Image (cartoon, rainbow, N blue to C red):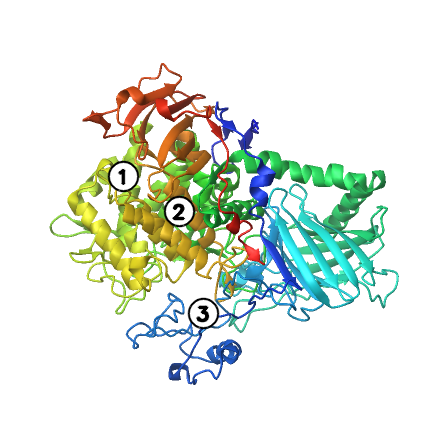
Amino acid sequence: MTITFLVLFSLFSCGVAKYTYIPPSSPVINSIDWNNYLSRHDPIWSWGSTGSNCFTGYTQLNDTIKYDSLCGGTACSSLETCLDESATQCENCPGCTSFGLCPVWKDGLTPQLYGNTTPYASNSQWTTYVKGGPLLRNHTGCTGTNGALAWEDSAFFGNGITGGLLRSDTKDPLRMLRMDIGRTDIYDRRTPYDNYFVNNIMFDRPRLPVGYIQFTTNGNITQGTIRIHLYNATISGFLNTTTGTVSFLLFTHRITGVFFMQFNTTGNEIPNYNNPNNNGFSMNFVPLPGNSTRSNPPENYQYNPLPTCTGTLYNDLMNPYICTQDLLTGSNYATAFSTVPYPFSSSTATFLTAFYIANDWPLATSPITANETIVNQLSIALENNGENFYTSIIGDHNNWWNNIYWPESYLSLPDTAMEATYVMQMYKYACAATENGPAIDLMGPWWEPSGWELYWFDMNVPVTYWALYAAGRFDLASTLTNYVFSNLTQLQMNVQPSSIYNDSYGVSGVAAYDLNSTYTVSPGQQLGNLPWLCQNLYMYASYMGNDTMLQYDIYPLLRGAINVYRHFSFVDENGITHLPPTSSPEYPYPHGPTNDTNYDLMLFSWGVRTLLELSTKFNIDDPLIPYWQNITVSLTPFPRDMNHGYNVSLGVGFDIPHRHFSHLFAMYPLHLTTYEILDGATAESRLIFMQSLDRWTGLTCVDGQSHNFCPNGFTFVGAASMSALMNDDDSRRQAAVGNISGFIQSGLMHASTLYSEGHQPCFESPPGIASTIQEVLIQSWGGRLRIFPSVPSTWSDAIIYNLAAENGYRISAVRSNYSTQWISISTPLYDNFNYNNRTVQLSTLGMNITSYTMLRTIPSNIIINPVYTNGTLTTDITFSIAMNSTIIVYTESSITNNFVIQPLVGNSSQYNYWGMH
């Protein structure tokens, strides 16, 4: 199959430079059968008479959840009792945290904070109490009575701004399914000018719920199957009941955002929608009150009015059922719902349902928009005796997924479960983001009760976006860029006191949907979040090769973010620059923060070095250049322990287990401290790298040296990514994939690959592990391009197609029979005057090149500069590449397939790995 690329136009507002990105054509032949490749990764839920058995709701890890006298409890009389009682017990436990965990550390004395541990029954010294989660995935299947009950196990779908979660309903799992629906841009917008303003963004500006669709069968469900079809982003289902059958096709239209469901019924499941006492299959929309669900609201918090509903649910195309949520702000949002008979001739009763969530803020016209959208879209679908539903509605939806989204890039691995996990994250991204839509928050387009109904920048948002850059899915990644650059004024207003920081930008750990955030620069505060976010945006622009954005957008934003440190820092009597006490994200300090916190020092160092790099690259005569140059030599060394590597801050060693790796940012993701010789590593930096990583994982992860039992998803991400940087050591490469597999198999990632903490949505960790999977296969930083750098010796094969790298390169490569066969490097066509011929410094780890005569390129006139020692390639090869061109590097003996790429067959026993079946 030859792939035709769509021209993507990213038009940024509010001062963001306009930029046209045109991906290159390539001589690489992509022969992938997308439908076949993706269908082997479709998640499947099946339950009932298949005889399988799975856990839903509260489940156990390693067969045991226990509690003891710390929370006033006694040992469980049985496992089943423990599952039910532990939640209630812990609700009343004074030691439990908002993350839902009440643990005892390894020493049995120190109370754990921030949910940094997971119950490890294999280690008797660890005791953890479970409140609302973690709801752990068991891969063996489902009970004979119901499918998935936990929202984390739901079949999910979305169009980038609206989405749904489908599962069994706990109210009556024998007869009910429930589909929670949400929309990312629905949130409260209370301002200081309102009488109901409480001066707390958690309650003034949170995400708000919409409601759920309830499906009720006439008889009891005896067998059920639900499948996500990744290729088309649709969900199909089939239910056998004691009185008939129900089958359905469900999706959210990619372009219009309308939810469609076509369903067929037989027997006594045929609905009689003209009968108010209908006993057949039925559907109902249940609106939820539009208020914050965070616990302990202020006493003066005023709730929005209850939603109101009008119209009819069934058989009345021109009068849909509409539920409107009015807000105290004067605006509203609304959901329209309608079911009509579908003109389809068969032995089944066929119906078509459509529903749509409208949000016309700041106007109060959402009910009108919802009504018009449903009437219009259902009318179109029913034209031509219903054929338009397939040719127009489904056709337009499928075209985006089949021909635009999926062909952008892919990878294939010998570990099929790992490959499935990566594919699921690419699907999840497109469900959660759309060009010109909102940035991805902790929920995505779905909604579940949470105390984290905003944006979190101390880990969640940055980690969420990493994998989009190397995947080359810049249209989706632009949602974060647009979000930041559309709110520059707010970022400047955040920084207080403004009399000192009027040239600065900042954001705290949590921010509203307009980036409103309390950010007072004073000792003990968390200051580094915007510099870290700038590093994300730098990656975005660099992976696009977008010098225009780097110069005119990233540079001034980073300059303002680093100005916070410029004003806040101080110089000692020896001329050394220090930072007063700042907070490393969530670290449970025994005695509080101290000077020179590594989280901030490392970001400060990266920021000034990047500003100097950009000012040189773009010939910017900035008056702060002398200051930045001085910081590169005067900034105090990152605090470290000679035996354990990097500390948290001055005098505060990493002595308490902690899920964040903020104190290791110099290693990853900033790459200031390196491990590989070709990256400038020294014997000292290699020692620091090794000590720091081992200290962090050894303390934080149970049995840390096996790299399989970390407490949180992003702990696995950090451990795997740092291990992948130590690529001259196969044991570390094995550790990288071991951490990835450890997360996949830990139970922390649920049947759908959704993720939670304390039963509350947390989007970031599964996409974060997708980024680590990429880093095993391709790394691009520091001016070097590394292909298959951390593939372990046990992997004979691996495939990457059209992944992105710094300078706008697109990379395809094939590893076969334990050796890299060839590498294709393409550059796009730019409207960017700064792009000229660029030098590629290409690491060919694993190519097994033992003679320069074996090395070839296409085109053949490319001058390459390999360096050999004793006939073996010992350093990177370098060559120049022009815009809108492709170069293929290969060994003469390796070409047997004319640069054709197709996925590996993989392990068929791990096909359809996710789901519950």
Query: Could you tell me residue 675's position as x and y percent?
Result: 24, 44
Q: Tell which circle, 3 or 2, labels the residue nearer the N-terminal end.
A: 3
Residue 782, quarter of the rendered image: top left
Give the label on residue 533, or none.
none
Binning the other alpha carbons within 10 Å of mark 1 as few (below 14), some (14 to 19) or many (20 upward) gives: some
Label 3 vs label 1, nearer the camera = 3
Secondary structure, mark 2, is helix
Q: Is residue 333 left or right of residue 565?
A: right
Q: Which residue is mark 3?
A: 98
- What quarter of the picture does the N terminus occupy? top right
Query: Could you tell me residue 839's position as x and y percent?
Result: 32, 24
- From the viewer's perspective, is residue 709 above or below residue 898? below
Distance Cα–Cα, label 3 vs label 1: 38 Å
In this rendering, the count of numbered labels is 3
Q: Amino acid at mark 3?
A: Ser
Residue for point 20% across, 46% down: 686
Query: Could you tell me residue 674's position as x and y percent?
Result: 24, 43
Binning the other alpha carbons within 10 Å of mark 2 as few (below 14), some (14 to 19) or many (20 upward) gives: many
Q: Amino acid at mark 2?
A: Thr
Binning the other alpha carbons within 10 Å of mark 3 as few (below 14), some (14 to 19) or many (20 upward) gives: some
Secondary structure, mark 3, is loop
Distance Cα–Cα, label 3 vs label 2: 28 Å
Q: Which residue is mark 1?
A: 609
Q: Nearer the viewer, residue 158 or 449?
A: 158
Q: Amino acid at mark 1?
A: Arg
Q: Which residue is mark 2?
A: 772
